[in-house]
Amino acid sequence: TSLFDGLTEQPSDTLLGLISAFRSDPRPGKIDLGVGVYRDNEGRTPVLRAVKESERRLVEGQLTKAYLGAEGDVGFVEALMPVIFGLQPYGARLCGLQTPGGTGALRLAAELIARARPGARVWLGTPTWPNHSQIMASAHLAIEEYPHFDVTTQRLRFDRVMAAIEAANAGDVLLLHGCCHNPTGADFDDSQWIAIARAMASRGVLPLIDLAYQGLGRGLEEDVAGVRATLDIVGEGFIAYSCDKNFGLYRERVGALYALSRSTGQAGIVQSNLLALARANWSMPPDHGAAIVRIILEDATLAADWRTELSDMACRMREIRTLLAQAKANLAPIAHQQGMFSTLPLTPMMVARLRDEQRVYLPSSGRINIAGLTRDTVPAFVRALLWLA
Ligand code: PLP
């Protein structure tokens, strides 16, 4: 007998399959809307200018590769705080540490929740990033799903969010996307955020906010208005942050987890538990990407250039959203959605026909990466959708 007899084959990542199918398709004019990274108008995912310069300085200036601690690069964790929380952070009630990407931050938050409150349930609005439920399940947390968005009507189900909070127990956790919802692009407006936060505060529900796309929606400040209001109102919660999209650092795995506690004493205990969990998971996070971000944020010129390039990326995606909305009546809601993704009401059969007969690649969920389109390819994509109808 083998130890491995107890294992069953796991499904492979469907997006990876899609990427290789796209690559091996010889047809000219093929369109890839599946990939989960930003692309410019030439279809490239370049290293940002500020990242290139910061990396050059890092390589030249770094004198040692000796270990840092489980908290990672403390300068990085602190330099991000004003970007996320504004100039009035929460003093010593806020603690944080560097993590391997937003994924690591979510995993650590989940493990801390499971340790602090083993019976807590995590409420997930669907559709959501598929890894959310896997991460929560891996930390042995119970998951409750509710519909966040109606794909057919392209409407946010705000009523269902409020109903979920109503149905939650005190001590349960509500996982929210800070901005640029993946995969629907449907974000809450300011008054909805406040209503959600007030309901969470009165029910004793804790926010776990996944913030993976700050600056890729309405703007760096605008994208976190809801996050800040929620933390102000609830007074406690987690921010699982990723720099992998807004700094274009994807494979470098740059993220951070912040926890806001009700008192500074509690924050110290929370931080000590987060460090202990980090040590048991990865000991310490990979350094390179976080050091790049720290150097950018600590240098006014590099930071300004990063903001410009980030805002250019967001502008480009807004332009594509506007072009789609103008080209086809039922794509109009896309102009009001934010960030890199929207989800179209397509069946898996329709998605397969788009791929086989129209050279348009997207996952069977109907999610499209807006940045997979350019001004030049929007008309072909819209023609493919019309052909389908
Ligand atoms: N959260 C959401 C909603 C995402 O879409 C992603 C990445 O696709 C992540 C978190 C994880 O980001 P990272 O690559 O930094 O782990």
Image (spheres, helix red, strand yellow):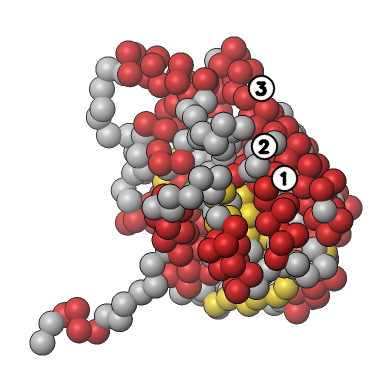
Say which of 119 and 179 sits in front.
179
Give residue 351's position: percent from left, percent from top: 60, 66
Q: Residues within 10 Å of mark 3 (few under 14, many from 20)?
A: few
Q: Which structural element holds mark 2?
A: loop
Q: Which residue is denoted by mark 3 in the rendering?
A: 308
Q: Can see residue 162?
A: no
Report the mark closest to the observer, 1 or 3.
1
* Residue positioned most to the left: 1
Name the residue beneath numbered marker 1.
379
Mark 2, other Cα within 10 Å: few <14 / some 14–19 / many ≥20: few
Instruction: Identify the residue at horizontal 50%, vertical 35% (top origin).
Output: 45
Observer-nearest residue: 171 or 134?
134
Q: Is residue 18 left or right of residue 361?
A: left
Where's the C terminus, which quadrant?
bottom right
Give residue 322's position: percent from left, percent from top: 80, 42
For residue 304, above or below residue 340: above
> Viewer-nearest of labels 3 and 2?
2
Q: Which residue was labeled with disc 2?
A: 376
Q: Position of residue 282 (x, y in %)?
A: 33, 51
Report, in whole angstroms, how far the alpha carbon at label 2 lies from the one at label 1.
Answer: 7 Å
| Residue for point 10% across, 87% down | 1
Question: Which numbered disc flags the more N-terminal residue, 1 or 3?
Answer: 3
Name the spot of residue 270 as percent of width and height, x first.
Answer: 51, 53
Q: Find the distance from the CA under tag 1 to the CA under tag 3.
A: 28 Å
**In this orientation, which residue lies closer to the viewer: 26 or 134?**
26
Which is nearer the N-term, disc 3 or disc 2? 3
> Are the residues at dot 3 and dot 2 in contact (C-beta closer than 8 Å)?
no
Q: Residue at x 47, y 28 (%)?
A: 47
| Of residues 333 and 123, the one drawn nearer to the viewer in this rendering | 333
Q: Local crowd at mark 1 within 10 Å, few (<14), some, or many (≥20)?
A: some
In the rendered image, the vertical position of residue 378 relative to residue 188, given as above or below? above
